[in-house]
Structures are given as structure tokens and as C-alpha cells.
């Protein structure tokens, strides 16, 4: 009973040995013949300089720092940050060498809040409300950043670090509506509605997962990437100037006209990489 089984196994091995090498994946697994020992694809398979265009979703975890909410809380509101929000990100990388790229980064950040609260005299919640206020706040920023990126070991799983600086176009809208109030309580309806420019800094570390098939075939789709970043993007305005000049009956008004609101902060980005090939 065992002889037919052995004969079948031997026949299967002979059949596999007859499969032509051309039918196997074109992967160079010999470290001594690869330009970088950790590459799974022979570097001679594509001698082109590879540039990368990345598109992703950036999850911002800590937006809303700065002095704005500290002063806003004096009015009676309970909102103290912008919460988590998602920004769209687009990055272009131009290769200067195997381990160095110059980068251009653009993103679309939009966040805000709506809140309805009662204004009371003092801190006792049992005190009758002086007024009821509805707030609607939104901020938009489009950072444009130029930088440099360093990846010392280029492999199928390439880790990298980078940093950049630039400017952000910003737009802020803050409207207040007094739902009810005693005769002496007055708030302006429009606190700020303005356009501005802000400085922006960004530092990050990431992982680029390159797919074999796309690199060999020189297809547009290169792979996926993941980044952790910290972005410093202060939006400064005279947020409280109108309120301080036209408001009446506000017991604990903000102490200054101007304040800063930080977008960005800690973020995580996941997206797709497209490769653009050019001859050296």
C-alpha cells in the first residue's frame, strides 16, 4: 500500500523540477547581487529615479490648544477644544538620491463646534440664568509646506523621517446668538469673520510599504504608507475684540482682544502612494 504513495510523491517532485524558471516570480533573492541586502526586488529591474505622490487621510488627535479656549470659558461656555477631526493630505516627493527627497505637502483642515449654554452670575449652578447663548464656531486652514525627507535604508518596508515649514491660509467664522437675556446683557452677533495667514511647522516619521508587482511593472500604484506627525499651526486673531468693545452685562469678559488657537498637533495619516518614474 505504501509503494504507490511513494511513487506518486517522486512523480510530483519530478514534475515540479520541470517547470521552467521563467514561470517563477522575477524576484532576486540573492543578497550579494542586490544593491541593498534587504530589497526583495533586484535594483537592476528598475534603474529609474522614483518620485512619489501620496494621498491620505490625516486623523488629528489634539487640535484646539492655545489661549482661545481659556478666555472663551470665561463667557460661560463649556467647550475646551476642537476635538478630533480628519484632514485630507497630499504630498509630493522628488528623489534627490536613494535616501533623500525634497517634499511639498498640502492639506485641508476644517474643524469647529456648536454649543448652547446658560450664563449665570457666579459659579453656583442653582443661580437663575442671566442669558442663554448659542455659539457657532468654524476654522479652516490650508497649510502649504516645503521640506526634506530622509530614508537611510531603502527596502520594501522603508521607514523615513522628515520635517518642513511653510505658510497656512486660514479662515475663521464665529457667530453668537443670544436666545434669551435680561435687559442688561448684550453680545455682538459676529465676533470674527476673517481671513489670514499663519506660519506652520511639521515633523513626522513614516513607513512606506512598496508592493513588488507595481515596482517591477512600473505601474502607477506603488503601495501604502503610514505617518505619525506633529504640526504646529497657530491661528491668531482678535477673537474677543468685538465682544469686549460692544458687549454689555458680561461679568467675566475675556482679558485680551487677541488669542491663539492651535490646529494640527499630534496626527496619524494613512494613505496611498503613487510612483512617478523618470530616467536618471
Image (tube, rainbow, N blue to C red):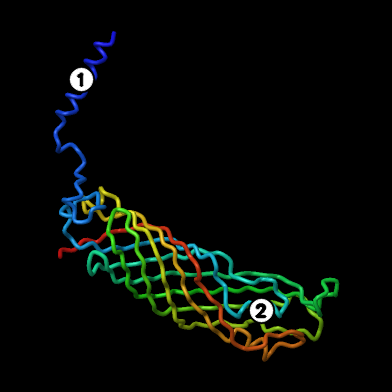
What residue do we see at 21% from left, 22% from top? 12
Query: In the rendered view, does 3 fall on the left or right side of 271?
Result: left
Mark 1 to mark 2: distance in Å?
Answer: 81 Å
Q: Which quadrant is the N terminus positioned in? A: top left
**Relative to 88, does residue 198 appear above or below in the rendering?**
below
Q: Which quadrant is the C terminus positioned in? A: bottom left
Q: Position of residue 191 (x, y in %)?
A: 62, 83
Residue positioned most to the bottom: 245
Q: Position of residue 272 (x, y in %)?
A: 36, 57
Q: Residue 72: which disc?
A: 2
Q: Quadrant of residue 96?
A: bottom left
What residue do we see at 40% from left, 58% from top? 226
| Number of numbered labels in the structure image | 2
Q: Quadrant of residue 224?
A: bottom left
Which of 42 and 257 lies nearest the eye of the viewer? 42
The residue carrying mark 1 is 10
Amino acid at each position: 500500500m505504501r509503494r504507490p504513495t511513494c511513487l506518486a510523491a517522486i512523480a510530483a517532485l519530478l514534475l515540479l523540477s520541470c517547470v521552467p524558471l521563467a514561470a517563477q516570480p522575477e524576484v532576486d533573492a540573492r543578497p550579494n547581487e542586490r544593491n541593498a541586502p534587504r530589497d526583495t526586488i533586484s535594483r537592476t529591474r528598475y534603474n529609474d529615479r522614483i518620485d512619489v505622490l501620496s494621498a491620505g487621510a490625516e486623523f488629528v488627535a489634539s487640535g484646539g490648544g492655545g489661549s482661545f479656549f481659556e478666555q472663551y470659558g470665561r463667557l460661560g461656555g463649556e467647550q475646551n477644544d476642537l476635538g478630533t477631526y480628519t484632514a485630507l493630505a497630499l504630498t509630493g516627493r522628488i528623489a534627490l538620491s536613494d535616501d533623500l527627497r525634497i517634499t511639498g505637502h498640502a492639506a485641508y483642515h476644517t474643524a469647529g463646534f456648536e454649543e448652547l449654554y446658560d450664563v449665570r452670575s457666579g459659579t453656583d449652578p442653582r443661580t437663575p440664568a442671566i442669558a442663554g447663548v448659542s455659539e457657532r464656531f468654524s476654522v479652516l486652514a490650508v497649510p502649504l509646506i516645503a521640506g526634506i525627507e530622509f530614508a537611510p535604508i531603502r527596502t520594501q518596508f522603508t521607514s523615513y523621517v522628515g520635517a518642513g515649514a511653510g505658510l497656512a491660509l486660514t479662515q475663521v467664522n464665529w457667530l453668537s446668538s443670544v436666545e434669551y437675556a435680561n435687559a442688561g446683557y448684550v453680545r455682538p452677533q459676529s465676533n470674527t469673520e476673517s481671513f489670514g495667514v499663519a506660519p506652520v511647522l511639521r515633523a513626522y516619521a513614516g513607513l512606506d510599504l512598496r508592493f513588488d508587482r507595481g515596482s517591477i511593472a512600473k505601474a502607477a500604484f506603488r503601495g501604502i504608507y503610514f505617518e505619525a506627525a506633529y504640526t504646529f499651526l497657530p491661528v491668531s486673531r482678535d477673537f474677543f475684540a468685538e465682544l469686549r468693545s460692544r458687549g454689555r452685562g458680561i461679568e467675566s469678559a475675556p482679558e485680551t482682544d487677541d488669542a491663539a488657537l492651535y490646529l494640527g498637533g499630534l496626527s496619524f495619516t494613512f494613505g496611498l502612494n503613487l510612483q512617478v518614474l523618470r530616467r536618471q
